[in-house]
Image: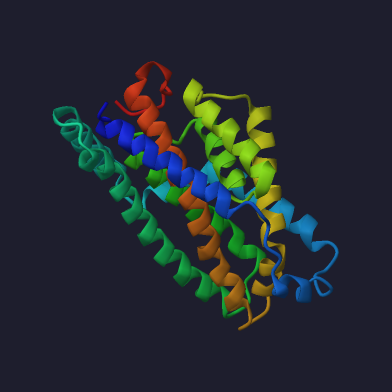
Amino acid sequence: MRKTPYEKEWDALVRKETRYLKNNSEKQEFILNRKLEERVPDKLQEKLDLAFYKGFQIVFEKGTTVIEKTYSKEKKDHAHKVDIYALELSETRKNLRAFSRRSRLSNARNLAISLGEGVATGIPGIGLPDIPIFIGMILKSIYEIALSYGFSYDTDGERRFILALIRTSLLKGRELESENAAINRLIKDGVPSECSSEELSRAIRSASDTLSQELLYLKFLQGIPIAGVIGGLSDAVYLKKITAYASLKYYRRFLTAQRNPETASSAQQP
């Protein structure tokens, strides 16, 4: 029996996710990390954990309005509705992929911005103070991905989902497989629009700790003038990694919602 465009896109998505899991089956040990290990102050990990945690809190509480000034939410909502209308008229793979194309364009622009910011903060040796900027760019990128697929991002339930994406994108091996499967189940059942403040706080802590552990040596290096460019450029490397995973999950969520609207989150835009 011939497959529908939706079924073909779903199969292609599953292949991409399988390839992603395979490519991240083992944690890489960087030579630079080993060389920096003895030089990193004992208290830096603790400071970095707190800086990421506070950074997420600040951006969630006060930064969303600022982030939304960097793009037109109304235009993105309109573009999504146009794409949905085209898909309703003709469910082709081309029309299904239109949402991903918009997402990739946003990702490319944000990656270029992140590269510039990494160099700008790396040359003078700005390390920890760069973290709110980095978090803002991560969230900006994911917000634009969400809008490309017609989902909101400003409820606590959506924030917890976003934090889970950020954390899982940095995992490896069996832990990645387990958390990825949990996210897929959440998408299948429908992402709740709300969650308790305690649940959100735990999600912020979990994502913050994972980010800080991953970036410990690079943030230390970023605090050294000139040499900090290497650490600063790592922001773009990790932004690309996070948005690549988020794009896969939002496309899965979009395809699931299109075929099973009763399981879609109430946060999806009309």
The scheme the figure's colours follow is rainbow
x and y, in percent, of residue 55 in the image: 62, 51
Q: Nearer the viewer, residue 131 or 179?
A: 179
Q: Nearer the viewer, residue 261 or 173?
A: 173
Answer whether residue 191 is visible to the viewer in this image. Answer: yes
Quadrant containing the C terminus is top left
Left or right placement of residue 164 versus residue 261 in this view: right
Quadrant containing the N terminus is top left
Q: Residue at x 38, y 37 (%)?
A: 11
Left or right placement of residue 123 versus residue 45 in this view: left
Q: Residue at x 32, y 31 (%)?
A: 7
Which residue in the rendered view is the most extreme toward the bottom?
226
Q: Nearer the viewer, residue 247 or 139?
A: 247
Which residue in the rendered view is the most extreme toward the top?
262
x and y, in percent, of residue 203 in the image: 65, 37
Q: Is residue 48 above or below residue 74?
A: below
Q: Residue at x 33, y 51 (%)?
A: 71
User: Looking at the image, how many numbered discs can be counted on the residues?
Assistant: 0
Q: Nearer the viewer, residue 38 or 61?
A: 38
Left or right placement of residue 221 versus residue 132 in this view: right
- Rendered image quadrant of residue 76: top left
Left or right placement of residue 126 versus residue 188 in this view: right
x and y, in percent, of residue 13 in the image: 40, 41
Answer whether residue 190 is visible to the viewer in this image. Answer: no
Q: Is residue 121 above or below residue 246?
A: below
Q: Residue at x 66, y 29 (%)?
A: 199
Which residue in the rendered view is the most extreme toward the left?
89
- Rendered image quadrant of residue 85: top left
